[in-house]
């Protein structure tokens, strides 16, 4: 099995099209097709279902994809490690982050990293913590800043950054704001909730906290960005249960503590592959985060 076969396979799987993959790889379509057929012969299994419009992975193809991505990521890390030993950090830093993550000012961190390592190409992807964990484990991302949603595995490890408690945000005219006291999960059973998509880290942690308290809640207004969530609460269309630092983005809203939940309900982590598979660029970024003199974000600004 040759590395180019795996590179060709991953490209076709990503583009779901032989012609587009061949153009991206700058190889002939016939050469790409021959490479895939050679890989299929070696594995004794079809990897794609081919139609006139696109190609999709077979069950065998899906099984191979994750392994192929990890192998290629490790090869890339090996090349970058040799360059680092020679005193030059180059290659690509593929970073993922969830919105408004606590414990790290992503823009400032990347700016400081670029000043120190100008030969490294930075790629940034924003997504939910669940998807980011899968991307790091598969080798598609070098690291990600996310909320902890699972325990460490053989393919994924986490470095703790910070933690913060649950906070309830509501409109100043809401009955909860009028009471002006900390609330319990059971006090919120009949409320209309604004929350993020289920893949987001805060949504997963909030769902777990309410499930642990035995309180059922329905998210009626589901959004995919922080500002939309705050706008809906600001119009008194519902309440939101969020990490505490969100309250600084909309000071006019009332913030209440949620009692009888874990004190550190939201834990921010850096997600990385196993130590041996971590790229030099990812190591340098984490070192900079831990020891660098970074400019903090202004008060009320989104940390990421």
Image (cartoon, rainbow, N blue to C red):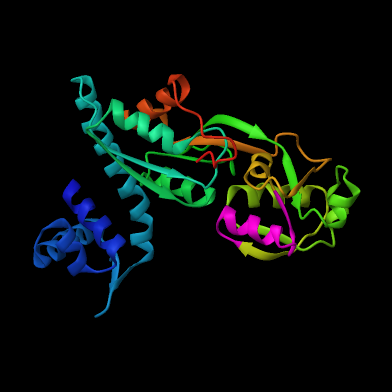
Residue 176 or residue 192, whichever sits in front: 176
The quadrant holding residue 278 is top left
Q: Residue furthest front?
A: 252
Q: Is residue 269 above or below residue 83?
A: below
Provide residue 298's location: percent of width, then percent of height.
54, 35
Q: Is residue 121 left or right of residue 175?
A: left
Q: Is residue 170 magenta?
A: no
Residue 73 or residue 2, whichever sits in front: 73
Q: Is residue 12 left or right of residue 247?
A: left
**Number of marks drawn:** 0
The quadrant holding residue 26 is bottom left
Provide residue 127's location: percent of width, then percent of height.
48, 52
Q: Is residue 65 above or below residue 284?
A: below
Q: Which residue occupies 56% across, 30% down?
A: 160
Provide residue 259's location: percent of width, then percent of height.
83, 40
Q: Residue furthest bottom?
A: 52
Residues in magenta, as a range:
223-241
Q: Is residue 295 above or below residue 255?
A: above
Q: Is residue 60 left or right of residue 164?
A: left
Q: Which residue occupies 42% across, 32% down?
A: 109
Q: Which residue occupies 84% across, 40% down?
A: 260
Q: Is residue 197 visible?
A: no
Provide residue 129's location: percent of width, then percent of height.
53, 48
Q: Is residue 226 magenta?
A: yes
Q: Is residue 290 visible?
A: yes
Q: Which residue occupies 52% across, 51% down?
A: 128
The quadrant holding residue 11 is bottom left
Q: Is residue 201 above or below residue 54?
A: above
């Amino acid at each position: 099995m040759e590395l180019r076969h795996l590179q060709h396979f991953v490209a076709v799987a990503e583009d779901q099209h032989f012609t587009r993959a061949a153009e991206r790889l700058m190889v002939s379509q016939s050469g790409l097709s021959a490479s895939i057929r050679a890989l299929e012969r070696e594995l004794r299994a079809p990897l794609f279902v081919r139609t006139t419009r696109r190609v999709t992975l077979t069950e065998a193809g899906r099984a191979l994809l994750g392994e192929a991505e990890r192998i290629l990521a490790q090869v890339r890390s090996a090349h970058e490690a040799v360059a680092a030993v020679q005193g030059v950090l180059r290659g690509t830093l593929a970073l993922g982050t969830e919105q408004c993550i606590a414990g790290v000012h992503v823009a400032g961190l990347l700016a400081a990293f670029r000043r120190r390592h100008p030969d490294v190409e930075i790629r940034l992807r924003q997504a939910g913590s669940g998807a980011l964990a899968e991307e790091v484990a598969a080798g598609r991302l070098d690291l990600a800043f996310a909320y902890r949603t699972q325990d460490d595995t053989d393919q994924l490890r986490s470095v703790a950054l910070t933690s913060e408690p649950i906070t309830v945000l509501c409109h100043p005219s809401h009955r909860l704001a009028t009471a002006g006291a900390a609330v319990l999960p059971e006090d919120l059973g009949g409320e209309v909730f604004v929350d993020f998509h289920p893949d987001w880290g805060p949504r997963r942690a909030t769902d777990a906290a309410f499930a642990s308290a035995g309180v059922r809640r329905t998210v009626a207004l589901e959004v995919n960005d922080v500002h939309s969530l705050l706008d809906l609460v600001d119009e008194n269309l519902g309440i939101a249960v969020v990490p505490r630092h969100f309250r600084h983005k909309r000071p006019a809203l009332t913030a209440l503590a949620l009692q009888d939940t874990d004190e550190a309900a939201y834990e921010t982590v850096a997600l990385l592959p196993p130590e041996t598979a971590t790229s030099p660029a990812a190591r340098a970024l984490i070192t900079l985060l831990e020891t660098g003199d970074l400019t903090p974000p202004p008060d009320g600004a989104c940390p990421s």
